[in-house]
Image (cartoon, rainbow, N blue to C red):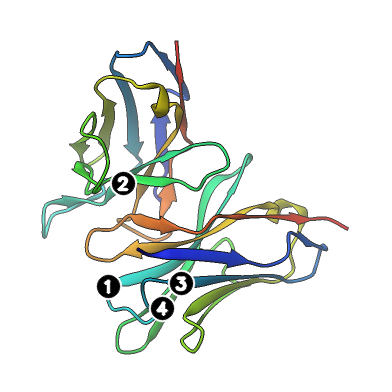
Amino acid sequence: QVQLQQSGPGLVKPSQTLSLTCAISGDSVSSNSATWVWVRQSPSRGLEWLGRTHYRSKWGYDYADYVKSRITISPDTSKNQFSLRLNSVAPEDTAVYYCARDRTSTGGFDYWGQGILVTVSS
Amino acid sequence: DIVMTQSPDSLAVSLGERATINCKPSQSVLQRSNNKNFLAWYQQKPGQPPKLLIYWASTRESGVPDRFSGSGSGTDFTLTISSLQAEDVAVYYCHQYYSLPQTFGQGTKLEVK
């Protein structure tokens, strides 16, 4: 059974960096049959795909244009986890942030982290 | 970006009755090379992450009750709950994974009448 456990602060000051981690059990961040994604959800913007990482002989990354200049997703094979860093946050980045597994063979996000509400406020 | 438009925004259905939710992508999500529609449906209950119900537009995820079904192709899709149960009260989302950025519908809130 795959489980994703998220960790990180729930409060970030404007202009600072949001950092979250997603620890994977029951699968590998280096799996060839999965892609690891970050999604956020807010009342004003709904569900938003932020980006992903995957390993296919080498690491690949894709980011949404609306955060591309600010986002980094990093895998950590030693800890079997992946992380999200979002720089220069503003109040509109306030959202529940989720990590999820994108099942490559069929598409669709079949496992999700529990979600962390991150509030951007001074 | 592909815009996903769901209708209605909210829906109230009596227990045991049929519930139908529509999703219209702004462009086709059908991949002609394998004739697969790159569309999924999720159920989200308060305080929980979304739960995958359907992928490839019509394939039920393992463990999902067979009262849930998906249909459609191209730019017109439907999620149907054949006989509403109390535990089906939730918000439902469609999701396209045909192109990046992957996008979601705005959600349809399903309640019991």
Name the residue: 28% across, 78% down. Answer: A32
- Of badges 2 and 3, nearer the viewer stands 3
Contact flag, marks 3 and 4 (Cβ < 8 Å): yes
SS label for mark 3: strand
Contact flag, marks 1 and 2 (Cβ < 8 Å): no
- Mark 1 to mark 2: distance in Å? 18 Å
From the top left corner, tell me how far across and down residue B65 is, in percent. Answer: 25, 35
Residue labelled with disc 3: A24
What number is the disc on residue A33? 1
For the residue pair A104 and B14, the one nearer the viewer reads as B14
- Labels 4, 2: one chain: no
The answer to which of marks 3 and 1 sits earlier in the sequence is 3
Residue labelled with disc 4: A29
From the top left corner, tell me how far across and down residue A58 is, in percent. Answer: 35, 89
- Labels 3, 1: one chain: yes
Residue labelled with disc 2: B40
Position of residue B77 relative to residue B19, above or below, is below
- The image quadrant of residue B14 is top left
For the residue pair A27 and B60, the one nearer the viewer reads as A27
Position of residue A80 relative to residue B21, above or below, is below
Chain of the residue under label 3: A
| Amino acid at dot 3 | Ile
Dot 2, crowdedness within 10 Å: few (<14), some or many (≥20)? Answer: many
